[in-house]
Image (cartoon, helix red, strand yellow):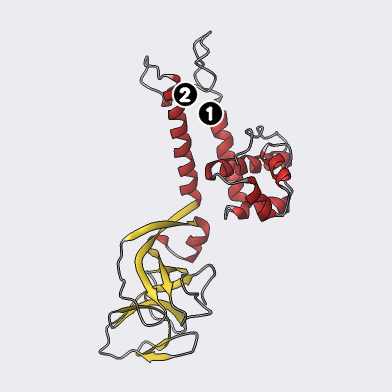
Amino acid sequence: MSPARTPPAPPRDGAAREGALFVQALHALVEVNGVPQSALADHTGVSQGYVSKILCGKQLPKGHLRERLADFFHLSYREMLDIGRERLAQREDEEYSMPGQPGDPMFPRDAVREDISSPQGVTYPCGERALLKNLLRDIKAREVHQRYYTEVPLREATGSMGGGSTETGTRTITYLSFRTEWIRSKGNPEFMSVIRAFGDSMAPTIADGCVVLIDESRRQFVTNKVYYIRHNGQMYIKRLIGNARDIRIVSDQDQACIPVCEADDFEIIGRCIWMARDIE
C-alpha cells in the first residue's frame, strides 16, 4: 500500500535533515515499487503502524532501523540519502510550475513546468498534462533505477551439473537487476550473464535449479574454481582442478573426476561467481 501523503520537506538542522532525506527516499521507493507496508514491517521487525508513521513523516527511524529499511531495497544508507536528495530536488522543481489561469478551477498548482510543456502558446488539457507528469515521473524512476542498479541478461542457455546440457542458446530471456556497487566489485558487468543450473552433482556449492552469475571475461584456467564449460558438445557447471596441461573436471558432491584429453572439444565459457552467495 502506498503511503497516504508525501512526507514533509527536510528541516535545516543536520541530523534531522538527514533522517528526513532518508524518509524521502523510502517514500519514493515504496511508491515506485508498490511495496506494501506489511512487507517492510516484516523485514525490519517493527509494526505496520510504525512503518506508516515513518512514511507519513511523523516518525524518523533510528540508525539501525534505517540500515534494515535500506537493506530491503538492496541499497546502502548513503545511496538512500542520494535518492532522498534527488526526490527533494524534484519537489522543489515542482514549486516553480506554471500557475493556472486565474479563476479557472481546471488548472490547479500541479501544472507542468514551461520547459517540459508544449510549444509556447499551446495549452494541454488538464488530463493530458497529468498524463505527461506521470510519464516524467516514470522516466525519473527509471533514471534512479539505472543509477543504482545494473541489468544482466538471463540467457536461454542452461548449465548441467550432471549428465550435461545441450541448451547453448545465447538469446536473452529477461534481465536481472544487481546493485551496481556490488556487481562492479566482482568485475565488469558488460561481460556477465546469468544462466539456470540443473542437477545436484555440484551440491552443496550450487543447488539444483538456481541461477548462476557467469563472468565471461574470466576464461583463464585457475585450479579449484567453478566454471561454466563446454565439454564434447555438452554444457556443464563444474569445478576444474589440476594445471593448464592436465585439467580435470570435478563434481563437488561425490568428487567424481573426468580428465580433459587433448582431443576433447573443451572450452571455458566463464567463471561462476555468484549463486546467492560467493562461490569459492
- Residues at marks 2 and 1 touching, judged by CB atoms closer than 8 Å: yes
Give coordinates of residue 24: x percent, y percent. Answer: 62, 39
Question: In what element is the residue under mark 1?
Answer: helix
Image quadrant containing the N terminus: top right
Specify few, some or many for label 2: CA neighbours under 10 Å numbering under 14, 14-19, or 20 or more. some
Q: Please give left or right for residue 147 compared with residue 156 in the image.
A: right
Question: Residue under circle 2?
Answer: 113
Question: In what element is the residue under mark 2?
Answer: loop
Give coordinates of residue 26: x percent, y percent. Answer: 62, 44
Residue at 44 percent across and 29 percent down: it is 131
Of label 2 and label 1, which has the lower sequence position?
1
In the image, residue 124 sits, relative to residue 61, either above or below, namely above
Specify few, some or many for label 1: CA neighbours under 10 Å numbering under 14, 14-19, or 20 or more. few
Q: Quadrant of residue 91?
A: top right
Question: Residue under circle 1?
Answer: 93
In the image, residue 229 sits, relative to residue 250, either above or below, namely above
Work out how far the residue at label 2 is from the one at label 1, CA to CA, in angstroms.
8 Å
Numbered tag placed on residue 199 in the rendering: none
In the image, residue 5 sits, relative to residue 119, either above or below, namely below
The amino acid sitting under disc 2 is Arg
Give coordinates of residue 240: x percent, y percent. Answer: 42, 84
The amino acid sitting under disc 1 is Asp
